[in-house]
Structures are given as C-alpha cells and as structure tokens.
Image: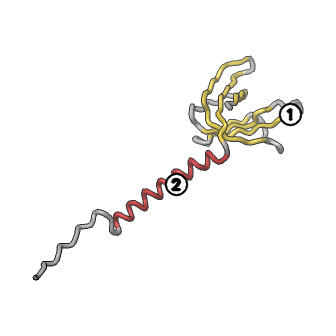
Amino acid sequence: MDRTIVIAIPAPIPHGHRVEVVERANENGERTVLTVTDLETRIRYQHGVSAAGAATWVGRVLECTIMPVRTGVSTTLLVDPVGPGAAEADIALRGADAAASTVTSEALRWGGADRVPEPETPRFW
C-alpha cells in the first residue's frame, strides 16, 4: 500500500530512489514525518528532531511533487514501503553476482576450458 508523505521543506528525491522515513505518532494518531533520508545519495532532509518512540521504515519513491505554499515550499512524496529484508536482499544479490563472476574467472584461470589439450602418444601395435 502506497503512502503519501508531506514535509514542509524542498526535498527533490528522484523516482525509484530508496528512502528511509522516521515519523512519530501523536496522541490523536496523526503521524508527523521527522526525517527523510535518500539512501541512494545519503542526503537527509530533516524537518524535526528525532525523538524516542519514532518509527522508522524504508520505501521506494514513486512520485515527488514540490509546490509553493503560504509558509514557503512543501514536498509531497508517494512512497511504496518495502519490507526490511527487501533492501538487504538487493545488496546480498549484488554481492552474490560479484562472487560468482570471481569464481568463474578463477576456475578458467586454474584449469578451465581454455587449456590446450596434450597431443596423443603414438600407438604401436
């Protein structure tokens, strides 16, 4: 389920970037976004001071709209939340691909398919 986040600062985050959102719920159940961190560029957009009891979650940006309002500028982000394991799985798969590539090159170097076959010994009958 996509979530809409509104923060009162300009935060131009491109489509597809992963973001980490820190938000706090007040007594009425309304959520206030304190920090949005772009995990691709490591830029943090901080609207408030992080406090105890704040919830942190990770998602992928689907839309980003920056518009002027009476108090300055407002950013509206449409974010698709991803589970905590999904971000880690992407990193693990990149590491696995790199390891497989290294193993393949080492196997070819130490006796793989590029070997020249030895000539056959002459047969005497």
From this view, report whether residue 93 is shown above or below residue 76: below
Disc 1 designates what residue?
A: 26
**Residue found 67% across the figure and 19% down from its top:** 68
Taking the image as shown, residue 106 lies to the left or right of residue 116, namely right
Residue 95 is tagged as 2
**Residue found 86% across the figure and 33% down from its top:** 26
Residue 115 placement: quadrant: bottom left
Q: Secondary structure at mark 2?
A: helix
From this view, report whether residue 92 is shown above or below residue 82: below
Residue 52 placement: quadrant: top right
Q: Secondary structure at mark 1?
A: loop
> Residue 91's spot in the image, x, y percent?
56, 50
Q: Give amino acid for label 1.
A: Asn
Q: Nearer the viewer, residue 27 or 114?
A: 114
From this view, report whether residue 89 is shown above or below residue 114: above
> Residue 101's spot in the image, x, y percent?
42, 56
Taking the image as shown, residue 114 lies to the left or right of residue 33, namely left
Q: Earlier in the sequence, mark 2 or mark 1?
A: 1
**Residue found 51% across the figure and 51% down from its top:** 94
> Residue 83's spot in the image, x, y percent?
67, 43
**Residue found 61% across the figure and 42% down from its top:** 39
Q: Give amino acid for label 2.
A: Gly
Residue 118 placement: quadrant: bottom left
User: How many neighbours does mark 1 have within 10 angstroms: few (below 14), some (14-19), or many (20 or more)?
Assistant: few
From this view, report whether residue 101 is shown above or below residue 2: below
Q: Quadrant of the N terminus?
A: top right
Q: Nearer the viewer, residue 34 or 121?
A: 121
